[in-house]
Amino acid sequence: MDYLDDISGEFSARLRQRQQLEALELSKEDAVDVTFSGRILASVGKEVELRLANGESLRGKIDRATEKWLWLRLVRMDILVQCAGIEMVQDLAGAPQWANYLEKNLPFAAALRELWQRGLEMTFTTCHHTVTGAGARVGKDFVDVADHGRNIAIPFPALLYVACPRH
């Protein structure tokens, strides 16, 4: 069984590498299948600078990514960023990577719950507001934040990013 898993994994890796090389060779006119999220996925492990819809810039290494969000790793902090809130990215990989099933379907809520389980105070940033507090509850499309005795509900589409210190 392990042998078949190894062969399957190696085949998938070689297929992705071949697709990336083919995409890199495409002329500008032929690159209609290349997506922004594909370039984000290909940049996992790279240091990039994000410019967000609220005017902020974040620089760090993309630790993991899906079509909808990315996990940016800084020296002492992890930042979960919604791709919809990104206006520009500096230093993205040129060739795209096509998303696998997990990268297409892993919801923002699952990544946010991972941060929430750390039990640390987090910073929730939208275009116009920043709230710092403990994530009280992570729903399907919202998060409740306990902020100095107030309970604030933030819908996911409004969130640009969530920052959480690492242990």
Image (spheres, helix red, strand yellow):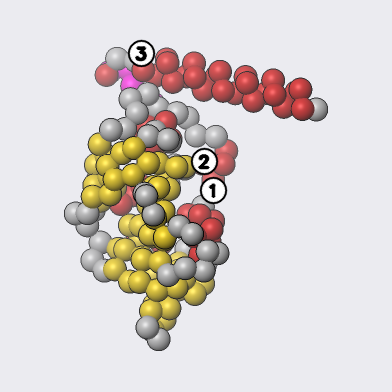
Residue 138 shows in the view: no
Q: Distance between the Cα atoms at labels 1 and 3?
A: 30 Å
Amino acid type, mark 1: Leu
Amino acid type, mark 3: Glu
At 23% from the left and 50% from the top, the residue drawn is: 57
Comparing 91 with 108, the one in front is 91
Query: Disc 3 marks which residue?
Result: 25
Residue 106: give its label.
1
Give residue 10's position: percent from left, percent from top: 63, 21
Give the residues in magenta: 29-33
Drawn side of residue 8 relative to residue 156, left or right? right
Give residue 147's position: percent from left, percent from top: 38, 79
Comparing 133 with 105, the one in front is 133
At 42% from the left and 35% from the top, the residue drawn is: 45
Query: Disc 2 marks which residue?
Result: 103
Residue 60 shows in the view: yes
Amino acid type, mark 2: Glu
Q: Distance between the Cα atoms at labels 2 and 3?
A: 24 Å
- Examine the residues drawn in magenta and state their main secondary structure: loop
